Image (spheres, rainbow, N blue to C red):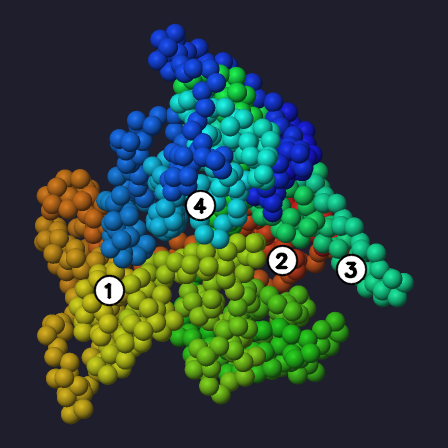
Amino acid sequence: MEEDAVDYKPFGSRVKKRKIDSDSEDEYEPPSVKRQKKIKVIVPKPEASKKRKKCQAAPKGRKLETSPEGTTKKARTAKKGRVASSNPEQIQSGEAYSEEWSEAEFVAHEQKIQLRIAQNIIHLLDEENTIPFIARYRKELTSDMSPEKLRDVKASYEMAKSVKQKASVVRNTITKLGKMTPLLERSIQYARSMNELEHICSGDLIGSKHTLAERARQLGLDEAANAILDGSSFINIETLVDPMKKGLASIKDVELGIQHIIADIISKDRDVLDLLHKLKEDANIWLTTSKSRPAKEAKTDNKKDVKKGRDGRKDNKDKAFVESKFETYFNFSVPIKSVKPYQVLAVNRGESLKVLSVKINIPDLVLHDLVKFCGRHWLCRGLSYSLRRRIIDQSIGDSYTRLIQPLLVRQVRSELTRKAEHAAVEVFATNLKTLLLTPPLRGNTVLGIDPGFRNGCKLGITSHTGSLLATDVIYPPFGRQINPDSDSSACKLKELLVKYNCKLIALGNGTACRETEAYLSDLIKNGWFYPLDVQFTIVSEQGASIYSCSPVAQKEFPDTDPNVISAVSLARRLQDPLGELVKVEPKHLGVGMYQHDVPEKELSCALDEVVVECVSFVGVDVNIASHCLLRRVAGLNSSRAEKIIEWRSNNGPFINRQQLKQVKGIGPKTFEQCAGFIRIIPETAQKKNTNSAENSSQRKKQKLSIDDTENPLDRTWIHPESYSVALRFIAKCGAKVEDLGKPDFVSKISITVTTAGLKELAEEFDVPEAQMKLITEGLKVTPEHDLRSEFQKPLFRRSISSLEDIHAGAVLTGRVRNVTHFGAFVDIGVGIDGLIPQSRLRNTRLRLGDRIEVKVFSLDIIRRRISLGLLRAL
């Protein structure tokens, strides 16, 4: 091998500048061709008893029986299954290697939850229960775990299943190749990550790189290496020398080959890997980054130099711009236990762009503990002679440098990236949930404005039910002082607002938003819309243009310009945010950061689950819900949603939840998952006239065997599986189910719960306490209650401030627009968002839409940056 340069790191650790797969080379070269630099390893000499030496002693100069070709007899059979353990009797019994970790144990360890809870959740997931259903209706099995935590548990379970599946495939492949040994099988069974599996099986699978250890084994050195490591017999290296064979030409060549085999065995030993896992958790490992060195430019002829020089200036500017984004990390060093998720993602991005050089510095303590462990594990057992001690000493250092240290680096980087990606997805999910649960402004006519310069401002006005009333386009005279009476845009705006008695305007935050905002503010100040008291609010345009061009939008507005549809969507986002935003793919809603740094599949899955959770927990009226809403209910999908809409179109509205079972595709399991999130509202469940012969024949064909009478409990979140308990409890309270939601009914329920107590009621009705609590709370909540009413409503304005109007020290109010790991962005009404750094949040957890009071710390008008500090939440 080539002589390796040595870097001296903090804590004195010595890391060779090698590729991760440094165990493989194109050719196997003896020391006479390539020199290897070794780490000096000092292992305490074993203190074997005289009795042990007497039993194991062999005549001096004892040799292994060899064939004429120079290989041992056992070496020819060792290719089929090598043994490398210090305790052969233990391998033969097989008892120590029969245990495997379970998915529940993995999940419990990863998520730090009780094993019993992990087993319950895994059982529920295996039965195809959805996260919303588990979170609401199986609280007694999850210890009232939140949907967010359940998603984390599900992700850990999926990871555990992937590792198990990969281990099974690898085990079968190696077995078919005839390379499986008890030691290798044990290591595979205990592997808890893909990195560890790949390391353990390197060189054993078809298509894997031919490692140095594998090449040495092919030379027949396996038996000798095992004998030296186990100390089972004395080895005479001279008998293994074969001057005619490459790799066996000298004693040094043979020793090096044996060293590679022993190093490979040490790095894959199950006990060693378990030790490394513990050391990795306890060691003070640092992440260090610096600016990467520019690549040397290849020499070219003069013509190419001229051409490259012109393009090179532009390239240099682009490169300088990219590098400027990572200046913070040009001299960056932090313990991995303290590194922030956004820092990890930024470092990874800088490394992929070849701007940053990244190193993981592992302290010498890891090597020191590994040396002591190997001494106890191997050297203190078996025969003791100088050759064995020297080769094992060298093998430990070689194993650490070439195999173990790169493995630790890969594991650390992988774990940091996984945690950072998970944290980024969590930010997306939290922000999306808050956005979807924005309270609706029902009963209001709203004007949506999609601002623009060249193409004008598109207008779309919707009724209180969300139906389209009118559309138009205006071209405001931005930057010019014009009398509103002579301004056609102002006149058109006033005409629309007065005609439909509209007092609320939803203004998109895209191009020309600032100018349109100032325009509206001036009109309101001048009383142009009198007698209407007009207000406006800024609405996120994220995803609106995508929706306006989608098949869903074209189906809703077949003859409407897509540019105008976006304005209608903005108005509806104010009236019913959840109903409108579910029409857009979650990743297009702009509720997080680093979306390009996290796996798209993981992000999409997490955001889709958040949408399902929000839609389910809010509940949908099955008789008026759109296809976009229905398909997001837990247990339903696009096909089932279409069947529900088809059923109500043919048979009239649903009268009760039980009628869902008549819909094709909704079996017992689907009904169990979705029924609790479906609402039957009396106002929309009125029977249609079904006296016609056509409708009568349709009903006969469907064999309606389910009662079509109304059930007041269908208006609540109580699941049909709990109806019998709910009815018995209502009777105990002396109330009637027909009075559900009335003040007297709610009062009787509250008094009974307070008097008897939840625990006693649960015992009386023989149900878990969590289920009893859900029933009682469902009966106390009025049918009109909306979960979203607990969140902050949009912030309306009549005027705005200018960036030049504020100064350092000013105290302002604003609304949180985005939340990240490094701080929160706040809209303070000046056209750009200010940033509250994490250090100034005062340990307060903010959410999208929160109204807060802030103080301006610094203002950079040229760069348009505002630094804020949190004073209090309003």
Residue 755 in the figure: left or right of residue 676: left
Separation (CA) of disc 3 from disc 2: 38 Å
Element type where label 2 sits in the image: loop
Dot 4 crowding, Cα within 10 Å, few <14, some 14–19, many 20+: many
The residue under label 1 is: 670
Which x, y percent locates residue 522?
66, 69
Query: Which kind of residue does numbered mark 4 sit on?
Result: Asp
Marks 4, 2: nearer the viewer: 4
Please report whichever mark, 3 or 2, sits nearer to the chain's N-terminal start: 3
The vertical placement of 149 against 431, above or below, is above
Marks 1, 4: nearer the viewer: 4
Whether tag 1 and tag 4 are in contact, CB under 8 A, the answer is: no
The residue under label 3 is: 315
Residue drawn at the location 67% of the way across and 36% of the way down: 34
Residue 871 in the figure: left or right of residue 268: right
Marks 4, 3: nearer the viewer: 4
Residue drawn at the location 38% of the way across and 39% of the way down: 77
Please report whichever mark, 1 or 4, sits nearer to the chain's N-terminal start: 4
On the rendered image, what quadrant is the N terminus found in?
Answer: top right
The vertical placement of 808 against 525, above or below, is above
Residue 143 in the figure: left or right of residue 30: left
Marks 3, 2: nearer the viewer: 3
Which x, y percent locates residue 181?
36, 39
Query: Which kind of residue does numbered mark 1 sit on?
Result: Thr
The residue under label 2 is: 829
Separation (CA) of disc 2 from disc 1: 47 Å
Please report whichever mark, 2 or 1, sits nearer to the chain's N-terminal start: 1
Query: Which kind of residue does numbered mark 2 sit on?
Result: Gly
Separation (CA) of disc 1 from disc 4: 45 Å
In the image, which disc is placed on residue 204?
A: 4
Which x, y percent locates residue 32?
66, 34
Element type where label 4 sits in the image: loop
